[in-house]
Image (cartoon, rainbow, N blue to C red):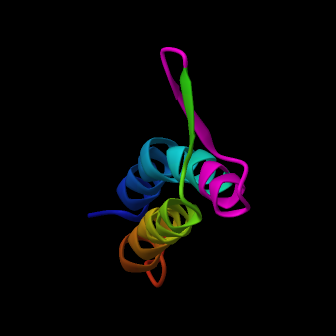
């Protein structure tokens, strides 16, 4: 695998994994701060802050995937 192929794979992972993880992290942070609500019909419920903490942790793992891909596929290879 060449360096160029590793860079392409890393960019694809950033678009497919890191971008949604950023939005998930923002939603999780707002939910953990007590701002999350869900509406079903006429009923509005508060989302527990623990759900927000879990979302933040999972999104941080999602942000590590492109970094790990870059480290293993690109770093250390010569052009």
- Using residue 15 as the reference point, say whether residue 1 is left or right of it: left
Number of numbered discs overlaid on the protein picture: 0
Residue 48 horizontal/vertical position (percent): 54, 58
Q: Residue at x 42, y 64 (%)?
A: 3
**Quadrant of residue 69 within the rendered picture:** bottom left
- Using residue 24 as the reference point, say whether residue 70 is left or right of it: left
Question: Considering only vertical position in the picture, is 29 above or below 57?
Answer: above
- Quarter of the image for the N terminus: give it: bottom left
Q: Residue at x 65, y 63 (%)?
A: 32
Depth check: 16 or 78 in front? 16
Question: Considering only vertical position in the picture, is 29 above or below 13?
Answer: below
The magenta stretch spans residue 28: yes
Write down the region rendered in magenta.
27-42
Residue 61 horizontal/vertical position (percent): 45, 71
Q: Residue at x 51, y 68 (%)?
A: 50
Depth check: 77 or 18 in front? 18
- Using residue 70 as the reference point, say whether residue 72 is left or right of it: left
Furthest residue in direction top, as rendered: 41
Residue 7 horizontal/vertical position (percent): 47, 57
Residue 78 horizontal/vertical position (percent): 47, 77
Question: Considering only vertical position in the picture, is 5 above or below 69?
Answer: above
The magenta stretch spans residue 31: yes
Q: Residue at x 43, y 42 (%)?
A: 16
**Quadrant of residue 45 within the rendered picture:** top right
Question: Considering only vertical position in the picture, is 77 above or below 26?
Answer: below
Furthest residue in direction left, as rendered: 1
């Amino acid at each position: 695998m060449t360096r160029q192929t590793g860079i392409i794979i890393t960019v694809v992972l950033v678009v497919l994994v890191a971008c949604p993880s950023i939005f998930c992290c923002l939603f999780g942070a707002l939910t953990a701060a007590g701002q999350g609500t869900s509406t079903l019909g006429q009923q509005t419920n508060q989302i527990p802050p623990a759900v927000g903490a879990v979302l933040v942790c999972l999104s941080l793992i999602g942000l590590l995937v492109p970094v790990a891909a870059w480290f293993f596929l690109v770093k250390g290879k010569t052009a």
